[in-house]
Amino acid sequence: MRRLSIAIFLSLFIGCGNLYAQGGKAEPNWIKFPLGKNEAIVSGRLANGQEMEYVFRVMKGQTVTIRNSNKSLFDFRVFNEEFDFETEFESSSSLAFSVPESGDYLFFVRKKLVATPRTSRFSMSISIR
């Protein structure tokens, strides 16, 4: 009985440790391109200073174009630590770049700190050619 109690305790302890180590951070959302299409729309709702994370897969040499429909309230950035590729947070209405290496790239959308509106919806398009 004592061994069973110790085994249960260790299982719970290890399980809680794994939960704590994850920090509650959610995985980024995959950007899904409709079948036969090279453009996808990401949208959501963010409050001041909040970010939403996405990930997309591209091949070396492809061109990624991002269009921001509300540059006064939202900015974005793209990066891949493995290939030492990173853009600054962009406040432009459009950004195009050639992908240096094939792989998964992270895409962050951030709500700017403005007095009003404190919360707003965003919509951005990403195309890959």
Image (cartoon, rainbow, N blue to C red):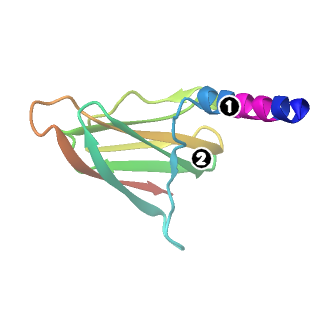
> Magenta residues: mostly which secondary structure?
helix
Viewer-side residue, 103 vs 101 = 103
Residue lying at the far left of the rendered structure: 116
Disc 1 versus disc 2: distance between alpha carbons?
39 Å
Numbered label attached to residue 61:
2
* x and y, in percent, of residue 77 in the image: 40, 35
* x and y, in percent, of residue 1 in the image: 89, 35
Amino acid at dot 1: Asn
As helix, strand or loop, the secondary structure at mark 1 comes to helix
Viewer-side residue, 125 vs 65 = 125
Amino acid at dot 2: Gly
Numbered label attached to residue 74:
none
* x and y, in percent, of residue 83 in the image: 63, 30
Q: Establish if 110 lies above or below 70.
A: above
Q: Residues within 10 Å of mark 2 (few under 14, many from 20)?
A: few
Residue lying at the far front of the rendered structure: 1
Q: Tell us which disc is closer to us: 1 or 2.
A: 1
**Side (left or right) of 32 relative to 114:** right
Bounds of the magenta segment: 8-15
* Residue in the picture at 51% in, 61% down: 32
* Residue in the picture at 33% in, 54% down: 43
* Residue in the picture at 63% in, 26% down: 21
In this figure, what is the number of numbered marks? 2
Q: Establish if 61 lies above or below 22.
A: below
Residue 22 occupies which quadrant of the picture? top right
Marked residue nearer the N-terminal end (1 or 2): 1
Q: Residues within 10 Å of mark 1 (few under 14, many from 20)?
A: few
Residue 73 painted magenta: no
Q: Are marks 1 and 2 in contact (CB under 8 Å)?
A: no
Residue lying at the far bottom of the rendered structure: 36
Question: Circle 1 sits on which residue?
Answer: 18
As helix, strand or loop, the secondary structure at mark 2 comes to loop
